[in-house]
Image (spheres, helix red, strand yellow):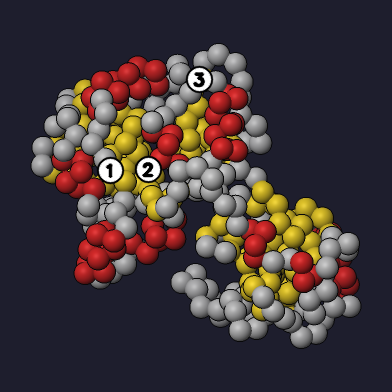
Amino acid sequence: MEAKVQSRLPRGEGWQYEPKWDGFRCLAFRDGDEVALYSRNEKPLARYFPELVPALQRIAPPRVVLDGEIVIFTGQGTDFDLMLQRIHPAASRIKMLAAETPASYIAFDALADGEQDFRQLTLSERRARLEAMLGSPPPPVYLSPLTANVDTALGWLNEYRGTGLDGIVAKRLNDVYHSGERAMIKVKEQRTADCVVGGFRWGKDGKRVGSLLLGAYRGKTLEYVGHTSSFDDAQRRELVALLEAHRGPSDFGEGRTPGGPSRWATERSMEWEPLRPELVCEVGFDRLEGDRFRHGVRFLRWRPDKPPRECTLVQLRAEASVDLRKLFD
C-alpha cells in the first residue's frame, strides 16, 4: 500500500496522520526464529541490515507480518546516505557498518498475526492489533507515532526541520489495506534554494534544452548540486536562445561536477555544455542527499537580482534543533 503526493493534507474526521520516515520501506516477516525483510518491490533486505534480525526476534508476537520503515538514526535525525552505503556486495563491509551505524525498524501497520490475515480489517482495527502485539517494543524496533489532529502533524514538519523527517502521511481510519495501490496521501516538506546555472544538457533531439545543471559555491568552488528539467516544449526551445548568450567557461571545477562518476550515468548522460556563472534561478526541492538534491527539482523563477556568489551550500543545510527520536516519547 503506497501513497500519492499532494500539496495539502486532507482535514476532517476519519483521518490518521503519521510521520513519513526517510528510509527504506520494508515488510518484516517473523516466524519464530526465522526473520525475512523485503522491500516494496520484493527485494530481500535482511542481508544488508543483519542487526534487525535479532531485534525482530525479540518482539512479542512469534509469527507476524509488519509493514514499516528501516532508518538509520544519527545525531538528531536520520541519514539516508548511510542507508545507501549498506547496499554493498561485501558482507564484511555490511557487518562493519551495522556495528558502527546500526539501523532501526519503525512499524506502522500489522498485516498478519499467526494464521490471521489483517488486510481486510480497517486501519483503526489494524492499528489496535499492532499496538496490542508490540506494546512498547525494545529498540531498535519502534512503534510509529500518530495523531488525529492535522495541525499537530503539520507542526512536526516545523519542529523537526533538518532531522530527516520526510513529510506527513494521511490514512483513512476505515480503509482496508489496499496492496499495490496509492491509497494514502503524503505531503512533503517543501524548501527553496537559489542556484547558479553552470551548464545544461541538450534534449534527445539536440534542438532544445533538456535540463539546467545547478551549482552552489563552497568557498570559491562551484559544486554541482543537481538539475531541473521542469519545462514544457515551448520553454525548452526558448531556453536555447537565452543560454546562448552565456556560453563559456563554467565555474564547475575541482569540486563535484555534472560529469562526475555515478552508478546511473551513461556516456550520453555525462555530456553537458558549460555556461559562465551568470544566471541564477530559484528552485523548489524536498530532500537532500548530502549537499545535493536527491531528485530533479522544480524551476520556480529566474533571480536576476541575486549575485551568483551568494548562492552557497550553506542555504541548503537546515540545522536540526531537536532530536527526531523525541517523537517516540
At label 2, counting other C-alpha atoms closer than 10 Å, the crowd grade (few under 14, some 14-19, many 20 or more) is many
Q: Nearer the viewer, residue 112 or 195?
A: 195
Query: Which dot marks residue 148?
Result: 3
Answer with left or right where residue 119 lies relative to residue 317: left
N-terminal label among 1 and 3: 1
N-terminal label among 2 and 3: 2
Residue 320 seen in this snapshot:
yes
Query: Which dot marks residue 140?
Result: 1
- Residue 217 position in % (x across, y down): 68, 72
- Residue 216 position in % (x across, y down): 68, 69
Query: Which dot marks residue 69?
Result: 2
Answer with left or right where residue 217 lies relative to residue 247: left
Q: Residue furthest top?
A: 13
Q: Is residue 43 above or below residue 267?
A: above
- Residue 143 position in % (x across, y down): 33, 32
Label 2 to label 3: alpha-carbon separation = 21 Å
Label 2 to label 1: alpha-carbon separation = 12 Å
At label 1, counting other C-alpha atoms closer than 10 Å, the crowd grade (few under 14, some 14-19, many 20 or more) is some
